[in-house]
Each structure stands twice: as structure tokens, then as C-alpha cells.
Amino acid sequence: MDSPPPQALFPSSFRSSITQSPLFQLMCVLLLAAWLLGVDGGWFFGPDLGALGLTDRDEGSNAEAAREMLETGDWISPTLNYEPRYAKPAFVYWLISGSYSLFGINEFAARLPSALSGLCLLWLQYVFVRKWAGPMVALFASCMLLLNLEFLGINRMVLTDPELVVFTTLAGYSFWHALHHEQAKRGLFVIFYLAMGCGMLVKGPVGIIIPLVGVIPYLTLTRQWGTFWQRGFPLLGIILVAAVAAPWYVMMFQIHGEAYWAAAQANTTGRFMNPMEGHGGTLLFYVPVLLIGFFPWSAFLPSVLYHTVKRWKAFWRGQGPATQEQHLECFLSLWVVGLLLFFTFSATRLPHYIYPLFPAAAVLIALWWKRFLTEESPVGLTASTRLLIGVGYLLGIAMMFVPAVFQLFMKQIAKEFPAAVQVDLAWLPSLVGLVMVIGTMLMRQCMRSDTKRYLAFWVGCGMMLIFTVLVARGGLSIYQQYFIGPPQELAVIAGYNLGRDDRLIQFGRKRPSLSFYAKRKVHFLGVNDEELPQHLAAPGRKMAIIQTQLRGQLPEAMAHWIVVLDHGGFSLLTSEPLL
């Protein structure tokens, strides 16, 4: 094959600095990530991290829980709307509260820990892969991890997953390094255990389960349990994990007793055994999630896994290959397949649950991408190209039909977001779809050409970069103005005008973010709620946020309430005139 060596991935004028300077590569990746994640606050014309209001329910709940923790000074027991919140441990709330202390209570500060976690993950990805596969593969793996929909979406949101994945990935990579580096210090195993302990403080037992899903099968398949027991000190590891995570859990049990135990069970084994909050789905739920969320790199994953999994039998029979790279592929493929199966058989399914497998998947694909550039007839190239075409064209065409689908379901959408009837999507979806189609077409052409195959990687990166900028700069402003902004802006007004003993009521679908914007407790009720009369009879001023179209359904006791402001299909009402 006449394709260029890896050095030819760059123009000659930049070749030596990039291919021979890992620091330069890493800085380029991190600066691009910081810009895309909006860490610069939009100063350099990037997508501002704080430009979009908090989405409900997860973002609003997490941001408000951290705000209340900072307000009350209770760093042990998280609350939401000033009621105990047992769904998640306190670690992420500590980070967000610290961000509030530095940058104020706002959307940027709430999302900053997630964005910084994304940068930490990319740094970890690059450093680990460079050690075991070289700087070029490290660059591939880091860019593939960065430039996909799920990474950029999750690390721009107030979720626990960004911090979780940093710790679970750190655990998996430090385990591998400690086991396979002859001169590795035992401190790497200490990092392995401490990272799992921190993961448990972020999101409970899943912080331990995720690394072990890869570690246990690998030790079993390659028959290295003896080595692990000699070098890994697992009994000490149990002590270290407990030392990190146990103090907080013990204090929660002491403070809240059976109430916390029941909630902890519901949010761990309960989520695995039964769908929670309507988040179910079929066993194939994660197939489209992975193909779209990790596009375009996901098109190469099935072929990579197929040919890597075929080698498992050789490892089991003691015929495993001697190269470290093939051992690494075995570990990563076991980890990816194990996590995919674990979350598939969990009854509660959400798109971001499989995010922990993305770092390992990116490394696997990067290793095979190197072979696409150097081998005469790369294994899996044809199948991967066909899948790339199918997913890319389908995604691009689907984007072009977004305006038609939006109009078709307008009435249903307007029930939750009244201002949506004013939305004019104009050219944006068509332009985004066109970018996906053209980008996929160019990647296909490059993949089919022996002399241009090396360009396919950069075409994929460019396509996702343009896609992200278009959606962030165009789509998010529409979403803010017509979907989530109006009730949040009314909540801010209510918060300024209500005293300590006054009440704020929200009618309709529960929106936890309103507590964040009002900076007070919000009573979430229905217009016919049995508890409504006692709230209306309470002393002090009452204010209410309700969809304008539902005002006619309010009880007669609220007939005298004054309309403060109608905004975006929502109304702010008050029981007494404002001064």
C-alpha cells in the first residue's frame, strides 16, 4: 500500500514539532477541549458554558443541591428543595459548592467541575496511551474521546458522570500500568484503590463496579490472579477504598438511619432490577445510543471488537500473544464488552450510562486506526466504512427532517413548552445535516483511497468540530429562549420579591431548576392538588408560576391573584400587589 506513514498525517512544516513533541500534542487537545466545553466563558467566540439555563431534571437538581449545601453549611447531608436528597453521594456537590464560592452561584460555576473533569479525562487518556502505544496513537485516542456528541454533551452539564468517569478510568488505567510495568511502584495500585473509593463517593457502588467489570475478567482470562495477589495487595485495597468512602456513608447512616438505607437500596439495586422514573427501554437501547453518541468513531467499534474478541480463546488456552499492545487490546475489549452488557441488563437505562466505556473504546479504535494507515489490507476496513456511511447519512438526513418532525409534534411539545410555537428553526438543521452528510462522504472517499486514508481521521475531527459549533452557537440559543428560559426568568423575579416567610408555587410538571433560580423552596403542585388549599391559607405573600393556558383551571380562591408578568407562555401571579 502507498499510504503515508503516521508522520505524514501533518504538513512537513509542523511535522517535527507535533510528532516529536507529546507536550505540544497534549496542549493542542486540551486547548481545543477547553474551547469546545466553554471553559473560557465564550471569550474566544466559543460555546459559552454558562449561556444555557439549567435543564431539568438532573441539572437543576444537582445545581440546587449544591447551592443549598453552600447556603446551609451542612456538608454531609445533601438536600434538594430543602428536603433530604439521598439519590447521590456528596462528592460532586462539594465540587460545585467550591466552584460557587469562587465564581458565584450561576450556570457557569455549576457546570465548571464537569468541564474540568472532561479536561482531566483527556489528559489521563493521552498520558496513558502515549506510555503504552506512542504519541500518535495517544493523539488519535484523545481526539476520538473528545470529538463525539456524548463527551461534549455530558461534560457541559451538571451531572455526576464526568467526575465518575475520571475516577473509573484512572482506576482501570492505573491497574493496567501497575500490573504490566516491571518497574512500576506499588503506589499505582494504591491509586487504583483510591480512585475506586472516590468513584464510590461520586455515584455509589457503581464507582467500584465499573473498573472491576474490566479487571476481574482480564485477570481470569489471562490467568494473572497470582501476580495480582502478590503485587496488588487486595486486602490493603479494601481498606483504602473503605477509608475514602466509608466515613461519609457511616455519617449518613448515623444521621438518617433507615430512611437513608432504603433510599440507597432504591438507587443502587433498585435501579438495576427495576426501571426508575420511566427510564426503561429494550435490550437494544444502547445500540443506537452508542452508534450516534460516539459517531463517527463508533462505526469502527463493531469490527474492532469482533476481531479482538476472537483472540480471547487464545488467551484462555494459554496461547496469548506476547506483545503488550495485544494484551492491552484484550483488557480494553473485555472492559468495553463487560460494561455494555452490564448496562444493557440493567433495568434502568439512560443514554449517559454507557459513557464510562468511551475512554477504553477510543483507545481500542485508535490502536486499530494505526493499522488502517500501515497495513496493506486492514482487517475490518470495508465493514467499518459501510457502517460509517449508514449511520452518517441517516443522522444527516434525520437532521434535515427535524423542522418537519417538529411541526408534526408541535401540539404535544407546546403542552410543556408553550413558546415552542414561535420557534423558527430556519436553516440550522439543514446546515447541520448537510455537514454530517458531506463529512461522511469525504471520510468514505478517504477510507477507500490508499493514498488518502490518513486524511479520514482529520475529516472526522473537522466534521464533529463544525457540528458542535453550529449546534452550540445556534441551537442552544433557541432552546434557551423558547424552551427552558421563560419559567426560570419568572422564578428569578419571584425570588427577588418574596420574603423569608412567603411561598412560591409552581403548577405543572416539576422543574427543580426553579428552586435554583428563585433561591428558595418551591412548592410543586397540580391545579387540583389536595394540598393547595393549605398553601393558599398560609400567612404571607404567595406567588405562583403557571402556564398561561392553564390559568383558567385555577380554583376560585386564586381568582383575585394579580398577573405580574406573562412571558414565553408562562405567567407569574401574586396574591398581593407588589410594592
Image (tube, helix red, strand yellow):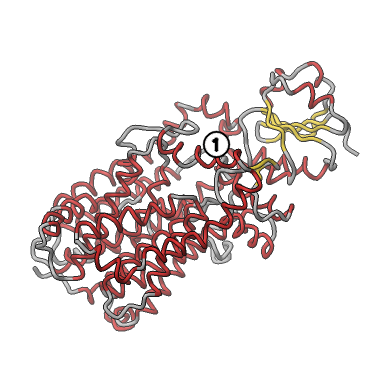
Q: Is residue 361 visible?
A: no
Residue 526 horizontal side relative to residue 139, left or right: right
Q: Quadrant of residue 98?
A: bottom right
How packed mark 1 is, by other alpha carbons closer than 10 Å (few <14, some 14-19, many 20 or more), is: some
Depth check, front residue: 371 or 332? 332
Residue 67 horizontal side relative to residue 3, left or right: right
Q: Residue furthest front?
A: 235
Residue type at mark 1? Val
For the point 36% across and 43% down, the residue is 343
Residue 437 horizontal side relative to residue 51, left or right: left
Location of the C terminus (image quadrant): top right
Vertical comparison of 392 with 333: above or below: above
For the point 30% across and 81% down, the residue is 183
Depth check, front residue: 317 or 554? 317
Expressed as whole percent of the image width and height from the top left, the position of residue 490 reads: 72, 39
Q: Is residue 372 visible?
A: yes
Q: Quadrant of residue 486?
A: top right
Location of the N terminus (image quadrant): bottom left
Expressed as whole percent of the image width and height from the top left, the position of residue 252 reads: 61, 49
Expressed as whole percent of the image width and height from the top left, the position of residue 87 reads: 55, 43
Q: Which residue is mark 1?
A: 423
Q: Residue furthest right?
A: 579
Vertical comparison of 23 with 568: above or below: below
Q: How many marks?
A: 1
Expressed as whole percent of the image width and height from the top left, the position of residue 91 reads: 57, 57
Q: Residue furthest top?
A: 556
Disc 1 is placed on an element classified as loop
